[in-house]
Image (cartoon, rainbow, N blue to C red):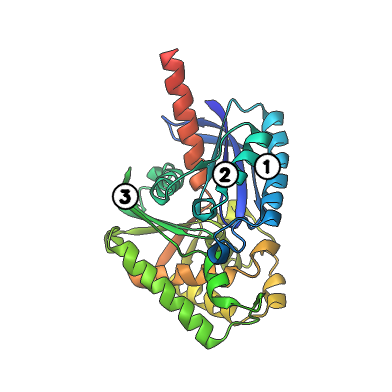
C-alpha cells in the first residue's frame, strides 16, 4: 500500500482524497476525503476567464488541504484540474497559485483523461459485484462538463461534452445575474434541448445503448440519491452503491425544477453550494437515463479522485521497482 493524496479541482468544487492504495488488488483505504464548493468556474462560460474571487476561494481551500496532506504524511500528491481551467484564458495564474501553496503543478487534463480516471475509480471495486452486468456506462456529471465512458474491465470509449450543472444553470436559468426562482417552462425547455444536443454529440463516440449497467458519479447524482432516500443528512455510506429508479429520478427532477431556492435549501441532505445548480444536474441525469432506457442508476461515491489515487500509487510502485 502506498499513501497518496489526490486533488480534483472542477468547475463547482475542489475535492481531496488521502488514502493508502494498492492498484494491483484494487484495495483503497480512505484516510480523509473532503469537498469544498469554490465555484471556480463562476462566469467562465461568459467571460472565458477565472474570476479573482473564484481563484481566492480555490486558493483558500488549497491551503486547508495542504495542512491535511502534511498531517497524514502522504508520500505523493497529484493535482488534477478539469473543465473550468481547461476553458480559461488566465489558467496560468491559477497554476502559479496552486504551485505556491501545494508545491505541485495542477495538471489540466483532457476530457478523455478525466473520463478514464472516473471509470477506474468507479468500477475497480464493482468487479466484486457479479450481479451487475457489463458493459458499464459511467457518467460523471460535473459543474462544467459531463464525461461518458463505456467499458468492461477497462475503458473502451469515452467522450466529454460541455454540459454540467453550473454551465447549464448559468447558460439557461440566470436572468440579470440571478437564478430564476423557479425557472420558467421556456428556460427548462431550452436547457433540455441543449442537453439533448450534447447527448447526440457524445453518442457519436460512445455506444450508450450497449451498456447494461449505468453508474452515476459526482455531486448531482449523489444528491439525487440522498433526496430519494430522504436522508436526514448527507451520508456517503448510505449513498455509495445505492440505486435510484428512473421513476424516482423523474419525480425528483420535476420537483427540483419547480421548487424555490428556499424549498431546495430546506432539504437536509443538500449542500448549500448545490442549491442553485442541482436542478440542472438532475435534468442531465434524467435525460441520460431516458436516452439509454436505463431503469435505474447505480450511484458511486468513488470517482475521479479514486482513479487519480490508484494512478499515483501505480506510478510510485513502478518507481520503486526501477530504484
Is 300 rendered above or below residue 29?
Answer: below
- How many neighbours does mark 1 have within 10 angstroms: few (below 14), some (14-19), or many (20 or more)? many
Residue 180 position in % (x across, y down): 63, 80
Precedes in sequence: disc 3 or disc 2: 2
Characterize the local packing of mark 3: few (<14), some (14-19) or many (20 or more) Cα atoms within 10 angstroms.
many
Label 1 close to label 3 by CB (< 8 Å):
no
Does residue 302 appear in this view?
A: yes
Residue 62 tag number: 1
Foreground pick, 253 / 191:
191
| Mark earlier in primary sequence (1, 3) | 1
- Gap in Å between the C-alphas at discs 2 and 1? 16 Å
Q: Position of residue 261 (x, y in %)?
A: 69, 76
Rendered image: mark on residue 7:
none
Judge depth for marks 3 and 2 and give the one in front: 2
Q: Residue at coordinates 55% horizontally, 75% vertically from top-left?
A: 252
Identify the residue at the far bottom of this view: 185
- Residue at x 26%, y 60% (from the top left corner): 210
Name the secondary structure under disc 3: strand
Looking at the picture, does residue 118 appear above or below residue 246? above
Residue 232 appears in the figure: no
Residue drawn at point x = 49 percent, y = 31 percent: 312
The residue under label 2 is 92
Place of residue 33 in the rendered image (x, y in percent of width and height, measured from the top left)? 63, 43
Q: Is residue 56 above or below residue 74?
A: below
Mark before the other along the chain sequence, 2 or 1? 1
Tell me the CA gap for discs 3 and 2. 34 Å
User: Which class describes the residues within 10 Å of circle 2: few (<14), some (14-19), or many (20+)?
Assistant: few
Q: Marks 1 and 3: which is nearer the front?
A: 1
Amino acid at each position: 500500500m502506498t499513501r497518496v493524496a489526490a486533488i480534483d479541482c472542477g468547475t463547482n468544487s475542489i475535492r481531496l482524497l488521502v488514502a493508502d492504495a494498492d492498484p494491483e488488488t484494487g484495495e483503497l483505504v480512505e484516510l480523509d476525503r473532503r469537498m469544498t464548493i469554490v465555484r471556480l468556474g463562476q462566469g467562465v462560460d461568459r467571460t472565458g476567464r477565472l474570476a479573482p474571487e473564484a481563484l481566492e476561494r480555490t486558493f483558500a481551500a488549497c491551503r486547508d488541504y495542504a495542512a491535511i496532506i502534511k498531517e497524514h504524511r502522504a508520500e505523493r500528491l497529484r493535482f488534477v484540474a478539469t473543465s473550468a481551467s481547461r476553458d480559461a484564458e488566465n489558467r496560468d495564474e491559477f497554476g502559479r497559485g496552486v504551485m505556491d501553496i501545494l508545491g505541485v503543478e495542477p495538471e489540466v487534463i483532457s476530457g478523455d483523461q478525466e473520463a478514464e480516471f472516473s471509470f477506474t475509480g468507479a468500477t475497480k471495486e464493482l468487479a466484486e459485484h457479479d450481479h451487475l452486468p457489463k458493459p458499464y456506462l459511467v457518467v460523471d456529471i460535473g459543474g462544467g462538463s459531463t464525461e461518458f465512458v463505456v467499458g468492461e474491465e477497462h475503458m473502451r470509449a469515452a467522450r466529454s461534452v460541455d454540459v454540467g450543472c453550473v454551465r447549464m444553470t448559468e447558460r439557461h436559468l440566470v436572468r440579470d445575474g440571478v437564478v430564476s426562482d423557479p425557472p420558467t417552462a421556456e428556460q427548462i425547455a431550452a436547457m433540455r434541448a441543449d442537453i439533448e444536443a450534447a447527448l447526440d454529440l457524445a453518442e457519436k463516440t460512445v455506444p450508450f445503448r450497449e451498456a447494461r449497467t449505468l453508474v452515476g458519479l459526482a455531486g448531482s447524482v449523489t444528491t439525487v440519491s440522498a433526496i430519494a432516500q430522504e436522508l436526514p443528512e448527507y451520508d456517503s455510506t448510505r449513498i455509495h452503491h445505492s440505486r435510484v429508479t428512473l421513476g424516482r429520478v423523474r419525480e425528483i427532477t420535476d420537483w427540483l425544477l419547480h421548487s424555490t431556492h428556499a424549498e431546495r435549501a430546506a432539504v437536509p441532505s443538500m449542500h448549500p453550494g448545490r442549491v442553485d445548480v442541482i436542478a440542472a444536474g438532475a435534468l442531465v441525469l434524467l435525460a441520460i437515463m431516458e436516452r439509454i432506457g436505463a431503469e435505474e442508476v447505480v450511484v458511486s461515491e468513488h470517482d475521479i479522485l479514486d482513479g487519480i489515487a490508484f494512478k499515483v500509487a501505480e506510478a510510485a510502485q513502478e518507481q520503486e521497482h526501477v530504484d
